Amino acid sequence: DGVVAQGIEACDDGNQDNTDACLNNCERARCGDGVTRAGVEDCDDGNAEQTDACLSDCTAASCGDGHIQAGVEACDDGNRVDSDACLDNCVAASCGDGIRRQDIAEGDPGFEQCDDGNGADTDACLTSCLSARCGDGFVQAGIEACDDGNEVETDACRNSCVSARCGDGVLQENEETCDDGNDVDTDSC
């Protein structure tokens, strides 16, 4: 009726608009009452749950608010740092996402020496997010002639990732009967 009955009503604005400062049941509108106030609240689902679409402060849940929205976000650390466990788009960081994690120490699970985000094992960064090196079993294009990933010096690939050849002074097992390390054809080898 537009008149506040003392002790009975908290407010009475005389209208049937439930989205203003006074609800239709003559109680003052507040965050958490389950009614969204126009221009004041983004949402109001009437609960204190922080993992649904509406936070307990009546703001709409969003990536970066520091609360993980169930079924929508994998993580939400509330910061804008892409080199930690949670990316800015609320996706959990992983090897191959193109962003090198720097928040964990070498030797700990998830540590990345590099992360170029591609599926190539022939460049400077392997798909395991480790830096390419001689002996890793992958031939680094333009850098290594071979890389068999073992420490056998007498096979077709030397431990320095150079291909074995006749005259290099190392006897290739099952391939050479001698190798004296020179190119002289008139000696005993």
Image: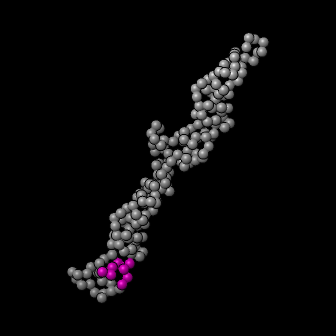
Image x and y of residue 112, in percent: 51, 42
Compared to residue 130, the image places residue 65 above or below, namely below
Q: Is residue 88 left or right of residue 1?
A: right
The one of 114 and 69 positioned closer to us in this rendering: 69
Give the residue at x 33% y 81%.
Answer: 24
Locate the C terminus by quadrant: top right
Compared to residue 123, the image places residue 5 above or below, namely below
Q: Which residues are magenta?
A: 16-25
SS majority, magenta: loop
Find the residue positioned furthest to the top.
188
Q: Is residue 182 left or right of residue 33?
A: right
Find the residue positioned furthest to the bottom.
1
Give the residue at x 39% y 61%.
Answer: 51
* Residue 74 on the magenta span: no
Can residue 133 be seen here? The reply is: no
Image x and y of residue 90, in percent: 47, 56
Q: Quadrant of residue 60?
A: bottom left
Image x and y of residue 141, in percent: 66, 37
Compared to residue 128, the image places residue 21 above or below, namely below
Q: Is residue 111 left or right of residue 125?
A: left
Give the residue at x 36% y 74%.
Answer: 35
Find the residue positioned furthest to the right.
186
Give the residue at x 34% y 70%.
Answer: 46
Compared to residue 57, the image places residue 26 above or below, namely below
Find the residue positioned furthest to the left.
7
The one of 60 and 140 positioned closer to us in this rendering: 140
